[in-house]
Amino acid sequence: MDKIVERSLLFDIYGNLLTEHQRKIYSDVVNNDYSLSEIGEEMGISRQGVHDAVKRIDKILNDYEDKLHFASSFENNQKIIDEIKDELKKLSDSGVDCRRIVELTDKLSEDL
């Protein structure tokens, strides 16, 4: 998985377990694509301090994932839903009315 996508997914899942300070720094890196210097200037810490904080936060989030596996479960479930949608499309193309199943699958996908 691409590092940016992985960081974003882990942050979405486990971000609320971080401190407010950690969330702000990591959100600026992952979601806002700010440079370490920009974040440091905004937060009143050095660029190196931001770098070290991001490395610590990466480790914290990866440790959560190693223990809880929510991100990997999410990805696996999303792949299964995509396969179901592909099969439903085939059925629908052959004339079977699958609208309700498609609606439920879409809702399930949104709720993940």
Image (spheres, rainbow, N blue to C red):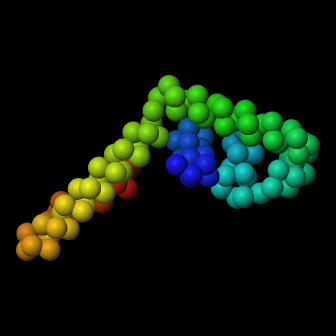
From the top left corner, tell me how far across and down residue 93 is, in percent.
14, 74
Q: Is residue 58 visible to us here? A: yes
- Residue 54 left/right relative to 47: left
From the top left corner, tell me how far across and down residue 83 is, in percent.
26, 56
- Residue 90 left/right relative to 35: left
15 or 46, nearer to the observer: 46
Q: Is residue 108 visible to us here? A: no
- Residue 101 left/right relative to 23: left
Q: Count the marks: how many?
A: 0
Residue 86: name its quadrant: bottom left
From the top left corner, tell me how far across and down residue 92 is, in percent.
14, 70
Residue at image position (60%, 35%) is 61
Residue at image position (77%, 57%) is 34
Residue at image position (70%, 45%) is 26
The residue furthest front is 1
The residue furthest top is 67
